[in-house]
Image (cartoon, coloured by chain):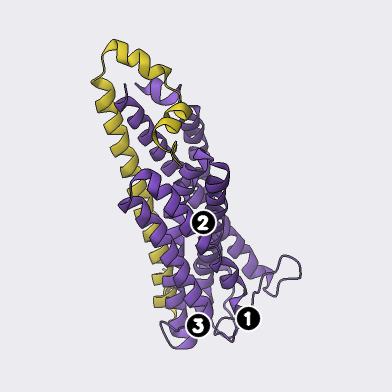
Chain colours: A purple, B yellow
Amino acid sequence: MLALLNEKSKKILISSKFRNLISILFIIFLSLGLFEALVISPKDYLQSDSVRIMYVHVPSAWISLGIFSIIAFLSLGVLVFKNKNFVLISKSLAPSGFIFNLIALVTGSIWGKPTWGTWWAWDPRITSMLVLFLFYFLYLLTWKIFEKNKAITISSYISIIGAINVPIIKFSVDWWATLHQPSSINVLSESTIHSSMLIPLFLMTAAFALFSMLIFLMKYNVELIKVKNKGLNRI
Amino acid sequence: MNLDLLIMNGYGVYVWSAFSFTLFNFFILYKVTIRQFDKEHAKFSKKYKSLNSQQITLAHKQSTNRTFVRTVAHKI
């Protein structure tokens, strides 16, 4: 039976090997990141130690945005090119994106209390992140309530419509007056954040990205076995 | 134990709860995914064991892609 699961499906075998490597890397990066974030990195001159929440809040927000963008792009591929594998990849990515979005919202709320004096504000950045959370929720809900073929189409449309919100989240701090500060890290220009804070931020981002990849591979295996289960039903 | 690391100038409760919430969610997501995998794997094992030798030969001839096209997304 294992032969059928593994030999006939190279995808499961390869991802299992790859999964172990990702797990080890995740543990290394997370340990280093936590040590840097909680012990080594300096406190902020204004926010004091509460700035350390940034090391879980910012990477979570980045990864949830990144995953949703990938899902939307793949969904376009599903609708335009009828690529069937994209459906499995998108479906396997969504749970970790959803959880990272939840972490970004909750840790942002926890950070808001000592910084702004409130747990929640209807600020453009926070509100647009909440909208993204609702899109993630709808995407996952679609797979629960509709039969497969309908779910593929509806979830694809949900993610493509939801993708409109991604640039709104990114540029909300520039377009509107907001409690959030403008971007501190820029790809094209010099970042305004000191390297002593950049190192833990990138370590935690790498750890979170590795974790989302690990969950993706595990979910992808689940989806593949589901397909194989259906195949056995037809014999 | 270093108390400063715990108290963090009065912000410890916020910092530690944010990190704990993150790691707790990681743990839950990992556990849920492992459980889903075990559930589907057990389903597959049960079905596979109920097959006769002819059906097993047929099962080994199925390719994932062909199965996928037939079962999941042929109507999109």
Mark seen at residue A123: 3
Mark seen at residue A208: 2
Chain ID, mark 1: A
Element under disc 2 = helix
- Sequence order check, earlier mark of 3 and 2: 3
Which sits in the foreground, A11 or A56? A11
Residue bearing mark 1: A175
Establish whether labels 1 and 3 are both on one chain. Answer: yes
- Sequence order check, earlier mark of 1 and 3: 3
Q: Is residue B4 visible?
A: no
Quadrant of the frame with the C terminus of chain A: top left
* Identity, as a three-letter code, of the amino acid under mark 1: Trp
* Identity, as a three-letter code, of the amino acid under mark 3: Asp
Q: Position of residue A162 (x, y in %)?
A: 50, 63
Which quadrant of the view contains residue B15?
A: bottom left
Quadrant of the frame with the N terminus of chain A: top left
Q: Residue at x 58, y 72 (%)?
A: A168
Marks 3 and 2: CB-CB under 8 Å?
A: no
